[in-house]
Amino acid sequence: MTIPDGVVAYLLAREPVFDRPEIIWDEMSFDAEIAPDFHEISASGRCYEREAIKEIVLGRLAGTHARSLAGGYRIEHADVRELATGLVQVQYTLHAEGRVTRRSTLYRLTTRWQAVFHQGTVVARDR
């Protein structure tokens, strides 16, 4: 199964999806980009449902929650793989604010690509 280069580039450019104000800038754009059944396992191991993530992301945009990557970040080892028809996984390593995490986002294609699941796992302190 080969994913078209344009789709790969499109999905890679979205990550980290909750820290890209050009992709999610308000409630309407959040609703367009994030699937109704979205859930997340954070780097701390906590589980979040869509509404909790929405509150955090919109709070960051409003200035009532701290930005998670305020110090900048670097993505390495990014890859996109098709898991099933209309379902892809974006994997990458994120270096940010003194730690390294491996991240995985699942995107499902309906009328558009929407994030349906995300997980981050701390693997090391950045040196």
Image (cartoon, rainbow, N blue to C red):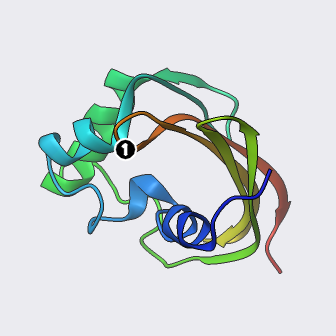
**What x and y, as percent, mark residue 25?**
19, 57
Which element is circle 1 on? loop
At 57% from the left and 67% from the top, the residue drawn is: 12
Please name the amino acid that badge 1 sits on: Arg
Left or right placement of residue 27 versus residue 107 in this view:
left
Q: Name the residue under label 1.
A: 112
Residue 51 image offset from top left, x and y in percent: 32, 23
Name which residue lies at 54% across and 72% down.
6
In this view, 52 is above or below 104: above
Quarter of the image that includes the C terminus: bottom right
Looking at the picture, how far across and down is residue 124, in whole percent?
A: 86, 61
Question: 24 above or below 22?
Answer: above
Image point (40%, 61%), residue name = 19
Q: Position of residue 46 (x, y in %)?
A: 62, 26
Instruction: Examine the rendered structure and indicate whether residue 92 appears above or below residue 115.
Output: below
Where on the picture, by quarter, is residue 125? bottom right
- Crowding at dot 1, Cα within 10 Å, few <14 / some 14-19 / many 20+, comes out as few
Left-right relation of 41 to 79: left
